[in-house]
Image (cartoon, rainbow, N blue to C red):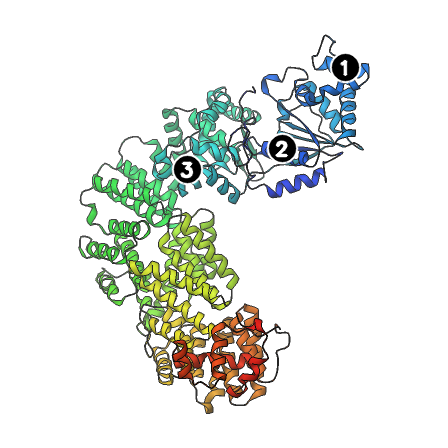
């Protein structure tokens, strides 16, 4: 058996070590393709390739995968593995390799047969010289390849004995014209007698983050997300490290972030592999390596500052030459050559040595408050309030820059070093709140909150405790809005905080209360929130005030509130606090100012993808989706919605999933997938109603409105629009009441509710929402055009099309053009109608809004003209549309048809109104001939 080493550990394709089990190669599709391309097609005849990479990077997995492929292509695969304790045993590797060909020795001439038998130790033949062995091995392989291609695979080339290495180097360079292929693997930089000159080398890189996440999820599926992120950072994409680092963690450590050590420990098996290399170093070299391991920045200045004399630097050079570290002069960085070596260095040290190293690093990092505080915290073993206070401030700094993982660990360590129970409870509560809000690790957050309550009996009455409990309830419990609201209001109204606007816990609790009130979608929930804002002394923080006041929506949001928002937006593009960015985005939703934050919202998303604040990542995705739909970035909206759903599922944020499902519902509606849209909307409603999350229900209604408008069921569209906000009134605290304002007017016009449509237009104009943004200005102008009398149609529609920024809202603009063209056609301005309908059809087709594109094309046909370049094919009617048309042809009135089909007369009229342009007719009289010309497949 080979001696265990990091290079001879056999990893299955998913990183495990089950012998004889073949798995799937994770994250190596591109590398496999490149290696196969270098080897050539088929069985890689006449090709030789050397695969290199750091220990544990997965070279063995790729060798096995390629070998299986070659065997499947008909080649005879000959393999050998270098073994450390056989390095001095001449021709041990060759013995492994040629074992399947032993029966062919007798087919060779006497001289070559004796040479091979002597080299491999068969019989009593003397050991021949190396030159004869080379010739005989090459001859044997060529003879074997005449019957069947031969593919040689050698793993751990660095541990192959010198004699075998020399022979294989000779063979690998003499494959031209043969049916022999050669592939060997060796750790990067390893010294070997194998002659590699002239051979192609391929360096196998570490796994990228996506593949590393997939591998880790397959091997340790229950690993908490923040712990997983720590493993990913420490492993640097090395498959062996990804598998081994979590193996040494206990069950609580795998789920509770606060219990993790500075450097993740090694499993006993891997620790034994590296311990001897570290233990054999001089004491000064070990001290410097410990500084490098605990600092984890790669800054060579740390080593220079920690070096005591020239002998120390010499020891560092010796460490480098021993291939434990590497120095990058270009980027001025020092790093361990293998990710597991860092953990091995820490594990080889004593507690005293680690404390001394942390104290030295605290002095070296004096100009970096966060790192200094952290090292002081690790060097301190007994309660110490000054150190705890430094750690608490460092936790706030980490939180503000969006590093919730570091902030939680820092607050937790601060609590551990706090002499007073009240301080300990406060700091643990802050860690618990961040855990519930930022990481989604509900179990760990709940455990931290329990520890905080035990530390300070008065803690349960604090607003921050209530905020943490509310977040745990929303994401981990039943998501009961009313219970979360009651918890928060009771804690806030207890008055123990004196409504001090400087109390960070109180302000955080009010932000959570704002989320709960908005999710509840009921005006009554907002009353305690606004009352608390008014009581804050000396005044509410501007951002919290703006979030609360703009949520009310126009006309309740006055000019002063908008000016307050403008002042907050100044300088936002230079901000680096993800929490502030997304909260400003929250304030921008109702005034429709999210486009001002597009760049910084993307910055938060990218930060989240790198392991940053999870909730902020979700919030920024919400804001980007909200921008993408009206601006026609529908493909991006779908991608971001899918990303949001995935994060909510993976990181335990189920409460926010509905928002991304809402965007999927919208997209299904506008693309004409009406049944899918209705099903998704129903799912949102069924989830939201028992929890009291009525805002989600209103969002689902918004999607239903669009689906029914697209399907031509204006009666249903009107009912759903009225559920959001009644005609003639803009509901407060409901942004979708603004987004769907033109939808309600359109549905009212098509169902002949002229008075209701006009009342809603007046409500929009009186609220002044057109002044908020170009999108809302377009919706108001378009709505006014929809209710225009015939003598004012042209003026009002032209005014809508001329709204500044209208081109940036392609879907709504195209809908207005379509309505304009329909009115012009009915007024017999056919030429003018065609221009608007052409432009509308082109826009709808570009967006993929098929129902509206079909409607525009039908209107064009009604003008006796088909759109150039439009999609051709038979007209498609639903089964219900065809049935209504057939009954209308039979002479039934709309009322009679409705009674037969259990529909309202208005719904029947809406269907017929949609059918005429679709069939290219202008009157009921032409319906019979139009239906007769349709093929049977036109109905489905």
Task: Name above or below for residue 185 compared with residue 566.
Answer: above
Residue 320 seen in the figure: yes
Q: What's the CA distance linking mark 1 and mark 3?
A: 66 Å
At a point 76% along the width and 33% down the height, the residue shown is 46
Q: Which mark is residue 63?
A: 2
Secondary element at image label 2: helix
Disc 1: which residue: 115
Q: Quadrant of residue 185?
A: top right
Find residue 880 and report its horizontal and vertical position in percent: 47, 74
Tell me, for residue 36, which label it has, or none: none
Work out whether mark 2 precedes mark 1 in sequence or the reverse, and give the earlier one: 2
Q: CA distance from mark 3 to mark 2?
A: 45 Å
Q: Nearer the viewer, mark 1 or mark 3?
A: 1
The N terminus appears in which quarter of the rendering? top right
Residue hosting label 3? 365
- Nearer to us in this view, 328 or 478: 478
Res 777 quadrant in image: bottom left
Distance from the alpha carbon under mark 2 to that under mark 1: 30 Å
Say left or right for 826 vs 160. Answer: left
């Amino acid at each position: 058996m080979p001696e265990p080493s990091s290079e001879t550990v056999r990893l299955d394709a998913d990183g495990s070590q089950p012998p004889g089990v073949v798995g799937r190669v994770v994250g190596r599709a591109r590398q496999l393709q490149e290696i196969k391309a270098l080897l050539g097609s088929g069985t890689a005849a006449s090709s030789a390739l050397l695969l290199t990479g750091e220990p544990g990077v997965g070279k063995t997995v790729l060798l096995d995968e390629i070998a299986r492929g070659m065997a499947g292509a008909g080649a005879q695969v000959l393999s050998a593995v270098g073994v450390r304790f056989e390095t001095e045993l001449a021709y041990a590797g060759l013995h492994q390799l040629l074992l399947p060909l032993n029966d062919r020795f007798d087919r060779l001439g006497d001289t070559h047969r004796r040479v091979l038998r002597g080299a491999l130790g068969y019989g009593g033949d003397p050991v021949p010289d190396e030159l004869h062995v080379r010739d005989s091995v090459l001859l044997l392989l060529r003879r074997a390849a005449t019957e069947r291609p031969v593919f040689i695979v050698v793993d751990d080339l660095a541990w192959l004995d010198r004699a075998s290495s020399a022979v294989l180097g000779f063979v690998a360079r003499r494959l031209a014209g043969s049916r022999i292929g050669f592939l060997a693997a060796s750790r990067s930089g390893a010294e070997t007698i194998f002659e590699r000159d002239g051979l192609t080398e391929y360096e196998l890189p570490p796994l990228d983050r996506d593949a590393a996440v997939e591998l880790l999820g397959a091997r340790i599926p229950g690993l908490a997300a923040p712990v997983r992120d720590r493993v990913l950072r420490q492993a640097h994409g090395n498959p062996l490290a990804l598998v081994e680092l979590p193996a040494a963690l206990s069950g609580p450590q795998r789920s509770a972030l606060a219990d993790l050590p500075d450097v993740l420990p090694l499993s006993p098996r891997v620790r034994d592999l590296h311990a001897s290399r570290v233990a054999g170093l001089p004491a000064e070299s070990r001290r410097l390596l410990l500084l490098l391991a605990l600092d984890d920045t790669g800054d060579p200045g740390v080593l220079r500052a920690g070096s005591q004399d020239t002998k120390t630097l010499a020891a560092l050079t010796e460490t480098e030459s021993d291939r434990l570290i590497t120095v990058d002069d270009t980027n001025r960085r020092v790093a361990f050559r293998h990710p597991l070596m860092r953990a091995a260095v820490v594990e080889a040290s004593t507690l005293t040595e680690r404390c001394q190293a942390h104290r030295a690093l605290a002095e070296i990092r004096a100009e970096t408050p966060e790192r200094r505080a952290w090292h002081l915290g690790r060097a301190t073993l007994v309660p110490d309030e000054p150190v705890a206070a430094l750690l608490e401030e460092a936790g706030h700094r980490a939180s503000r820059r969006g590093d919730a993982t570091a902030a939680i660990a820092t607050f937790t360590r601060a609590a551990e070093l706090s002499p007073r129970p009240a301080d300990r409870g406060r700091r643990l509560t802050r860690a618990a709140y961040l855990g519930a809000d930022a990481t989604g690790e509900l179990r760990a957050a709940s455990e931290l909150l329990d520890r905080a309550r035990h530390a300070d009996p008065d803690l349960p009455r604090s607003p921050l405790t209530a905020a943490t409990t509310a977040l745990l309830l929303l994401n981990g419990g039943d998501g009961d809005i009313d219970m979360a609201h009651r918890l928060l209001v009771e804690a806030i109204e207890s008055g123990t905080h004196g409504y001090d606007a400087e109390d960070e816990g109180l302000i955080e609790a009010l932000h959570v209360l704002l989320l709960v009130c908005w999710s509840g979608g009921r005006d009554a929930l907002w009353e305690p929130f606004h009352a608390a804002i008014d009581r804050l002394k000396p005044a509410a923080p501007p951002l919290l005030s703006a979030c609360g006041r703009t949520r009310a929506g126009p006309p309740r949001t006055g000019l002063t509130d908008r000016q307050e928002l403008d002042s907050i937006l100044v300088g936002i593009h230079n901000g680096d606090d993800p929490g502030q960015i997304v909260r400003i985005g929250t304030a921008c939703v109702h005034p429709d100012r999210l486009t001002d934050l597009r760049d910084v919202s993307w910055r938060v998303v990218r930060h989240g993808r790198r392991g940053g604040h999870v909730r902020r990542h979700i919030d920024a995705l919400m804001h980007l989706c909200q921008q993408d739909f009206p601006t026609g970035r529908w493909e991006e909206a779908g991608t971001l919605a899918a990303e949001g759903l995935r994060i909510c599922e993976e990181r335990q944020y189920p409460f926010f999933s509905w928002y991304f499902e809402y965007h999927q519902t919208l997209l299904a509606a506008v693309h004409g997938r009406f049944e899918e849209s209705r099903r998704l909307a129903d799912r949102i409603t069924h989830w939201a109603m028992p929890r009291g999350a009525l805002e989600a229900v209103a969002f689902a209604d918004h999607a239903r409105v669009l689906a029914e408008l697209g399907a031509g069921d204006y009666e249903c569209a009107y009912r759903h629009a009225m559920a959001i906000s009644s005609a003639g009134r803009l509901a407060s605290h409901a942004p979708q009441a603004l987004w769907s304002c033109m939808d309600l007017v359109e549905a009212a016009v098509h169902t002949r509710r002229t008075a209701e449509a006009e009342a809603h237009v007046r409500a929009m104009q009186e609220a002044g929402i057109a002044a908020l943004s170009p999108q809302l200005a377009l919706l108001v102008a378009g709505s006014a055009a929809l209710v225009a009398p015939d003598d004012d149609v042209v003026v009002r529609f032209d005014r809508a099309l001329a709204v500044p920024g209208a081109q940036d809202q392609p879907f709504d603009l195209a809908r207005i053009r379509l309505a304009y063209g329909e009115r012009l056609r009915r007024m017999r301005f056919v030429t003018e109608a065609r221009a608007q309908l052409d432009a509308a059809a082109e826009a709808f087709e570009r967006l993929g809004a098929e129902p509206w594109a079909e409607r525009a094309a039908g209107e064009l046909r009604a003008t006796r003209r088909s759109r150039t370049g439009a999609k051709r094919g038979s007209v498609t009617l639903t089964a219900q549309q065809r049935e209504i048309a057939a009954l209308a042809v039979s002479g039934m009135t709309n009322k009679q048809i409705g009674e037969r089909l259990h529909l309202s007369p208005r719904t029947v009229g809406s269907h017929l109104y949609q059918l005429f342009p679709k069939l290219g007719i202008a009157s009921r009289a032409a319906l019979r001939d139009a239906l007769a010309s349709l093929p049977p497949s036109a109905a489905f």
